[in-house]
Amino acid sequence: CREIYRNCSLELNMGESTFRRYVQILNLNTKTETYLPLHFNPGEAAQADWVEVKVNVAGELLKLDVLSVVLAYSYRIYASIMPSQKDENFIAGLVSAFESFGGVPEKIFFDNTKNAVFKYSGSRAIMQEKFQLFSSHYGFTPLFMNSGKGNEKGSVENLCKTVAKRILPKIPAVNKISEVQDIILSRTTEYNATHKIKNRKNSVNENFMIEKPYLKNLPIKSYDKYITKTAVVDSKQLFQFETNKYSVPEWLVKKTITLRVYPYYIEVWYGGNIITKHDRIVDKYQVTYVIEHYLNALESKIRAWNNAAPLLFGETYNEIKIFREKCKEENIGEKIMLLYQRLKAYGVELTLSAVSYANSKDNPTLDDVDDFIKFKKTNMIVKDLNDSNDSNEDLSQYNSLIPNNNNEKDQNE
């Protein structure tokens, strides 16, 4: 107000205090838009929206999306983190929410998300055909907000703030996106069990117990939480989905495989059977190798061991990952391949125990692994010998089978 007065003071024949009084009168005469408080019956409605979160996944700080759903009567929350806001993730998140609630509300309020709306907004919105089929399958009515009318969202605005404030802060660094979801589920479970909404008599959980019987039953057949794609395996035993590549066994090279792509992982199918499964990469232009997929090729290409990307970076047992990170010796690729040869020769349990022993040192070596195996194998032999010598079996029952020379001599006399 003071700044406006200064800019206009040369043209106004009044003091600043008088100018302020006129401004106050004008403000009092300005019509202010009012909002009606909303009330929903049990099972009547839910609201859904996206919330963004930054998470350290496998050493990379990534922006990920959380689909948050709240039942409008009880304020029970369900939240699921997704690699993106793509349609398949949107539908998978809603299916998971319905399964968590144990039923489906009569209607769900959405912002004008492209996942559901083809064009227009509010009551004029035209739904995406795919989303229309989904809503019909679960038997709920989608309702869309008018553009710029955040007040129509009611509890979902508070939902997004609640999820951002109580569920998403300080998520620790993780190795894969499914671990983030485990943390979110734990936090939402605690919130639903213990939180009480201000000015409400009952807790969230108590109100949900009232609301649950009013939810519609889940359909007999759940909607698939995956999309199906096909891919051709290249000569490096890799297939591509979006910008990332994943390995498969060598016998699939040049073959067309079927992918079932879930929010957190990808299944590889061929000939009606699942062949392998990968955690889904959420960053871009990355490659996931699995060492076991390349063992046959590696056996015949010894000179490539130290430069073989699967040995240097591939997925493997956690004990071998730690060994690979801590070992300071040269030719680490060769060391990893030799560990796999010991897995084959001595079995998984003994070899991984030996690797764990080696990892207890600052610089684990292959010699440490071999020493442990040799020690254990020697002890096993000694134990077997001791067990046979310490047998407590009563052998007197076999005396009658031993010739008695004294008795024979008496009979002859």
Image (tube, rainbow, N blue to C red):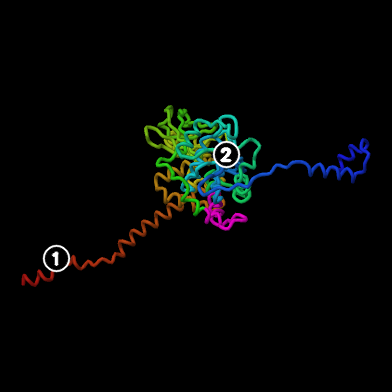
Q: Position of residue 279 (x, y in %)?
A: 50, 40
Q: Is residue 396 left or right of residue 84?
A: left
Q: Is residue 203 magenta?
A: yes
Q: Nearer the viewer, residue 13 or 59?
A: 13
The residue wearing badge 2 is 110
The kind of residue on which mark 2 rests is Phe
The kind of residue on which mark 1 rests is Pro
Mark-to-mark CA distance, 1 and 2: 96 Å
Q: Position of residue 87 (x, y in %)?
A: 53, 34
Q: For residue 314, say whether it is visible.
A: no
Quadrant housing residue 400: bottom left
Q: Position of residue 174 (x, y in %)?
A: 56, 46
* Badge 1 element: loop
Q: Is residue 366 above or below residue 408?
A: above
The residue wearing badge 1 is 403
Q: Is residue 326 magenta?
A: no
Marked residue nearer the N-terminal end (1 or 2): 2
Q: For residue 73, say whether it is visible.
A: yes
Q: Is residue 27 left or right of residue 358?
A: right
